[in-house]
Image (tube, helix red, strand yellow):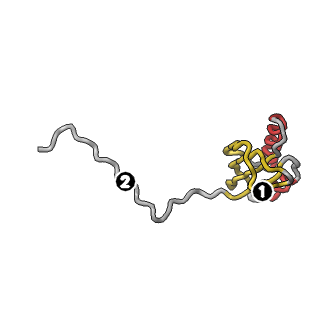
Amino acid sequence: MREYELTYIVKPDLDAAALAATIEKVNGFIAAENGSIVKTDMWGMRKLGYEIRRYREGHYIHNVIKLPEAAPARLENRIKLTEDVIRHMLVIAEPLKTPRNAPPPAPAPAPENAEPAA
């Protein structure tokens, strides 16, 4: 199983119940591909960078998921056919790397002795 990040935008004109149903539908697609959801972040309503299908805003949802190797293509096809999702992006999650120029970690402070030095 490989870890992926899935971010998708849902139509802004959906009420809370329809939004929850769309999120559950996408979560069901992930479960149908034998995947698991590690973390879900609801970023809320945000303005789009450009107009998509005549929408200027959308509900942003970000998931960190685990999927088998062959599942991402099938998952993307199912999401594309979902009318309430206006845009999505699925990428491989890469671990954060420390910069090469980063200073080394500070040494741990020396323990204080109970006896003063003479």
**Location of residue 51 (image quadrant):** bottom right
- Say above or below: 17 vs 93: above
Please indicate whether residue 38 sits to the left or right of residue 78 in the image: left
Residue beneath the point at 88% across and 49% down: 83
Q: Nearer the viewer, residue 40 or 35?
A: 40
In the picture, which quadrant includes the C terminus? top left
Mark 1 Cα-neighbour bin, 10 Å: few <14, some 14–19, many ≥20 = few
Q: Nearer the viewer, residue 52 or 99?
A: 52
- Residue 67 horizontal/vertical position (percent): 73, 53
Q: Which mark is residue 93?
A: none
Amino acid under disc 1: Tyr
Please indicate whether residue 74 sits to the left or right of residue 99 in the image: right
Label 1 vs label 2: CA separation?
A: 45 Å
Q: Which mark is residue 106?
A: 2
Residue topped by disc 1 = 50
- Say above or below: 30 vs 100: above
